[in-house]
Amino acid sequence: MEVVSTTGELRTAVAAARRANKSVGLVPTMGALHEGHLSLVDASRAECAWTVVTIFVNPLQFAANEDLSNYPRPIGDDLAKLRLRGADLVFTPTDDEMYRIAHGTFVDVGVVARPLEGAFRPSHFRGVATIVLKLLNLASADRAYFGQKDFQQTLVVKRMVADLNVSVEIRVCPTVREADGLALSSRNAYLSPDERRQALAISRSLREAKAMVTGGERNAASVLVRMRAILAEAGITQIDYVVLADPETLENQSKISGPTLAAIAARIGSTRLIDNELIEPSPEP
Ligand code: AMP
């Protein structure tokens, strides 16, 4: 496994892979790698001859009051995991390498970036779209792999790729969870044992929404009341959103008539967690 940190080295390695007629898979991450990230590496290796993993804690997607400076950066462990998993190249640039002093171009994706995460983290998706486009350009990947865990991010990236005619296939892989349901996240490392127990209410609430909707409930308000009750019973009070939304437009649904995204963002202590479930309602009787 090769590890490089400059855009020039990355381009040289990509060009060599291309000359060898290898298809290229890109897995963008911010590091602190867990099985969720590694499942994306597996998916890329299954479909592409050459897999590039990027590890970059992108300052542009963090607001001033967020956890940029505390974000975990266990680079030695990350590289060991990627070596075991068979990544071909890891790109670990510095901030200066990615954003030179005069950097002045940003990607604003529009409506799909505005609700949910966009409403609570207004500059977040501008940062995400900008770095993802830069990485896609550098890696000239055939396919790029993202997790459903960050569902809105997958919509933002797909919209950008369609609008800007980027030649890449976007693959979305299922959310990897702990056995008890907690979605794997680098931010879980911030949770105390008590907070981790409390955080389980997020996936429990989403599972309950899925059970209600697949069981025939069509009234979103009834489902949302139950979802909020589960969070409240666990003592979760700092809730950014609990929604049932159209998975293409992210508009809130009042009557559930087709595929539905159940999504939650909440703070457990000082840790902000997000999770979601895609729900396919049972056919009308
Ligand atoms: P991050 O390092 O948080 O930026 O995540 C990098 C990629 O890994 C994104 O595409 C995430 O959606 C994906 N990812 C994060 N957590 C999970 C998970 N639990 N299951 C699947 N993919 C995940």
Image (cartoon, rainbow, N blue to C red):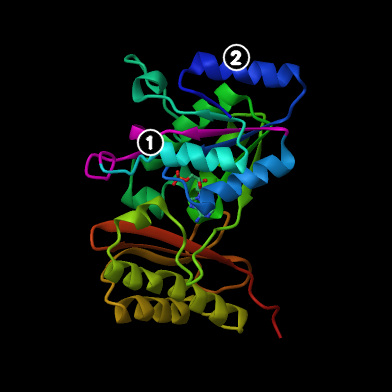
- Is 65 inside the magenta-drawn segment? yes
Q: Are marks 2 and 1 in contact (CB under 8 Å)?
A: no
Determine whether the residue tagged by mark 2 lies in a helix, strand or loop. Answer: helix
| Amino acid bearing label 1 | Val
Work out which quarter of the rendered image holds the N terminus and state it.
top right
Percent across and percent down for residue 60 are 35, 33
**What residue span does the magenta drawing correspond to?**
49-69
Percent across and percent down for residue 222 are 45, 82
- Residue for point 33% across, 33% down: 59
Percent across and percent down for residue 63 are 28, 40
Which residue is farthest right?
21
**Mark 2 or mark 1: which comes first in sequence?**
2
Percent across and percent down for residue 202 are 40, 70
For mark 2, does the 10 Å Cα neighbourhood hold few (<14), some (14 to 19), or many (20 or more) residues? few
- 219 to 89, vertically: above or below: below
Determine whether the residue tagged by mark 1 lies in a helix, strand or loop. Answer: loop
Marks 2/1: CA distance?
A: 23 Å
To which residue does mark 2 refer? 12
- Is 278 inside the magenta-drawn segment? no
To which residue does mark 1 refer? 57
